[in-house]
Image: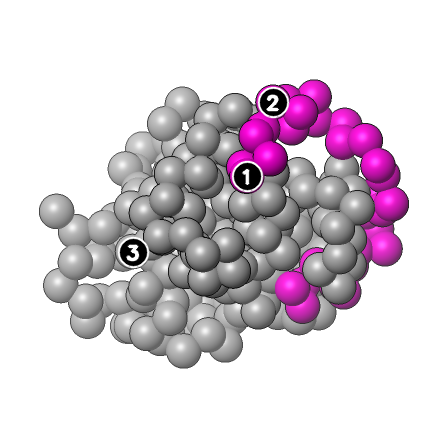
Amino acid sequence: MAIRVMLVDDQVLLRTGFRMVLAAQPDMEVVAEAGDGAEAIEVLRSTAVDVVLMDVRMPRLDGVEATRSICARTDPPKVLILTTFDLDEYAFSGLKAGASGFMLKDVPPGELLSAIRSVHSGDAVVAPSTTRRLLDRFSPMLPSGRKEPRHKHVEKLTEREREVMLLVAQGLSNGEIAARLVLSEATVKTHVGRILTKLGLRDRVQVVVLAYETGLVRAGGGTG
């Protein structure tokens, strides 16, 4: 079954460009479009969607608030935030609101398609290099230097799980973590799964958010 995609952007030309790229894929189908967050929420009431490509700055209702509303639904579609470097703060807010990842609007088509497939399969999409640049830019907005995490369940993690969590939060992929800790990727994936379960998080995006908010990781990749 094709991945049902919804395009949400107030710029018609951008939606047209994305639609042309997606339409050429045998495993994707653009089933809906909206010009702002409010329209997107309304359309989703009657249209089954798997992945929403969500712009951030739009009239009436922006992408962050729309994402928060969509992700609060029962069995919601995955949301992939589209942003520019000038809107990094909005992208982070979108992740906190429940989005499964973010990408730049000028992302190469191949990377966008890969991101859609990854999000649809249940993975989070946050490119390590982009994660580091993003968080370093607006980290002054976040608490830093905390020695005690606010999230009580962090204390339930084993030493190895905490180590893996910190590396995830610094933007490392499973393969990079495996190389750093001399583990197999399968073992790292198992650790990540246990971390998500213990902390009650949906995906590694939320691990990044939690680690920076609690001060476990600081700007520049340092640990708290």
Majority SS type along the magenta span: helix
Please report whichever mark, 3 or 2, sits nearer to the chain's N-terminal start. Answer: 3
Q: Does the image show residue 113?
A: yes
Q: Residue 119: give x, y in percent of width and height.
A: 37, 50
In the rendered image, residue 133 lying in the magenta stretch gets the answer yes
Residue drawn at x 38%, y 67% as measured from the top left = 112
Q: Residue at x 57, y 58 (%)?
A: 171
Which one is in front, 131 or 44? 131
Q: Amino acid at mark 1?
A: Arg
Whole-number angstrom distance, CA of label 2 to CA of label 1: 11 Å
Residue 54 can be seen, yes or no: no
Q: Which residues are magenta?
A: 132-161
Q: Disc 3 vs disc 2: Cβ atoms closer than 8 Å?
A: no
> What amino acid is at disc 3?
Arg
Picture coordinates of residue 33, whole percent (x, y)? 38, 54
Mark 2 near mark 1, Cβ–Cβ under 8 Å? no
N-term-proximal mark, 1 vs 3: 3
* Scheme of colours in the image: one colour
Q: Which labelled disc corresponds to residue 160?
A: 1
Q: Residue at x 79, y 46 (%)?
A: 224
54 and 98: which one is in front? 98
Q: CA distance from mark 3 to mark 2?
A: 33 Å
Residue at image mark 3: 117
Q: Nearer the viewer, mark 3 or mark 2?
A: 2
Check disc 2 and give the amino acid type: Lys
User: According to the image, label 2 marks what residue?
Assistant: 156
- Residue 154 within the segment the image draws in magenta: yes
Residue 50 spot, x, y in % from top left: 30, 43
Residue 215 occupies which quadrant of the picture?
Answer: top right
